[in-house]
Image (cartoon, coloured by chain):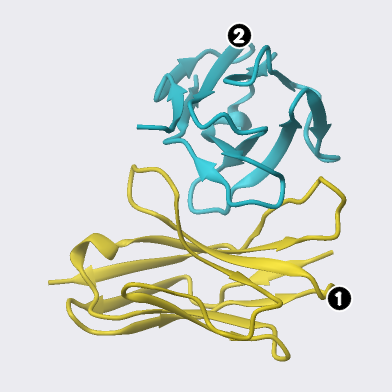
Amino acid sequence: DAMVIQNPRYQVTQFGKPVTLSCSQTLNHNVMYWYQQKSSQAPKLLFHYYDKDFNNEADTPDNFQSRRPNTSFCFLDIRSPGLGDAAMYLCATSSRSWETQYFGPGTRLLVL
Amino acid sequence: AQTVTQSQPEMSVQEAETVTLSCTYDTSENNYYLFWYKQPPSRQMILVIRQEAYKQQNATENRFSVNFQKAAKSFSLKISDSQLGDTAMYFCAFMSLTQGGSEKLVFGKGTKLTVNP
C-alpha cells in the first residue's frame, strides 16, 4: 500500500549528540513536511520541501536541518539536541501544497 | 495571521451516541480549506473530512459530517453512532489558498474524544 513511512518509530539520543530521523513515501508526492508535536499540543510545522525547494519556518531553530535527496526520502537532522527537543516528529506529504496532507506514524524522540 | 480555536480540550460520549466537536477560526481570506484530522493513541494522524470554503454544502463522510458556517467562521464536526475506535485526539485545521505555493496547515490545539462502552 502507498504510504508515508518513518524510521525509527522511537529514538533515544543523548543531550548534544546529533540525530537523524528518516521519512520515506511511496505516494510520489511533490511536497514533504516535518512537524514537531509536543505532548498534548498541536503539530508545529518546522519546514517543508516543494520538490527540491526548501521552505523554512521563521521560528524554526537553526539546530534543525533537513535534506531531501530525492522525491521519496526526506531527513530531519537535529545537530545538538536539547532536552526541549524531546517530542514526536511527524512527516507528512501532499501532491501539491494545497492538497490534503498524509501523515506518517511519527518518530518519538527522547533526549537524555 | 490565521488562528484556529477548539474550545473543548476533552469530551466523552457513550458508544452509539452522537457528539459534536466545535471549531472556530479567524481569517480575512475568502479562499481556504478546512480539515478535521484524527490522531488515535499511538497511531498516525489521518484525515477525517475536508471542506472547501467556496462550497455551501456541508461535507459528509459516512458517520462524520460538518456544520460549516462561513459567516460565523465556525466548522464543527458531528460524529454519529460513535464507536470505540473513534477514541482519539481530533484536530481542526485551516489552510489558506492564497499563499502562492506555500500553503500551510494551521492546527487548533485539539479535542481529546473518549468513546465509552
Instruction: Answer with the quarter of the image where residue A37 lies.
Output: top right
Residue corresponding to mark 1: B28
Q: Residue furthest left?
A: B117
Mark seen at residue A66: none
Mark 1 belongs to chain:
B
x then y, percent, for residue A28: 57, 29
Question: Around disc 2, counting alpha carbons within 10 Å, would you say few (fewer than 14), some (14 to 19), or many (20 or more)?
Answer: few
Q: Is residue B55 left or right of residue A51?
A: left
Near-viewer residue (A91 or B53): B53
Q: Amino acid at mark 1?
A: Ser
**Which residue appears at 29% of the width and 81% of the height?**
B80
Q: In the picture, which chain is yellow?
A: B
Query: Label 2's element?
Result: loop
Number of callouts in the render? 2
Per the rendering, the mark at residue A17 is 2
Find residue B14 and report its image quarter.
bottom left
Is residue B78 toward the left or the right of residue B68 in the image? Answer: left
Q: Chain of mark 2?
A: A
> x, y (%) of residue A74?
62, 21
Chain that is coloured cyan in the picture: A
Q: CA distance from mark 2 to mark 1?
A: 44 Å
Q: Look at 86% across and 54% down and name the residue there.
A: B99
In the rendered view, tell whether residue B113 sits above or below residue A23.
below
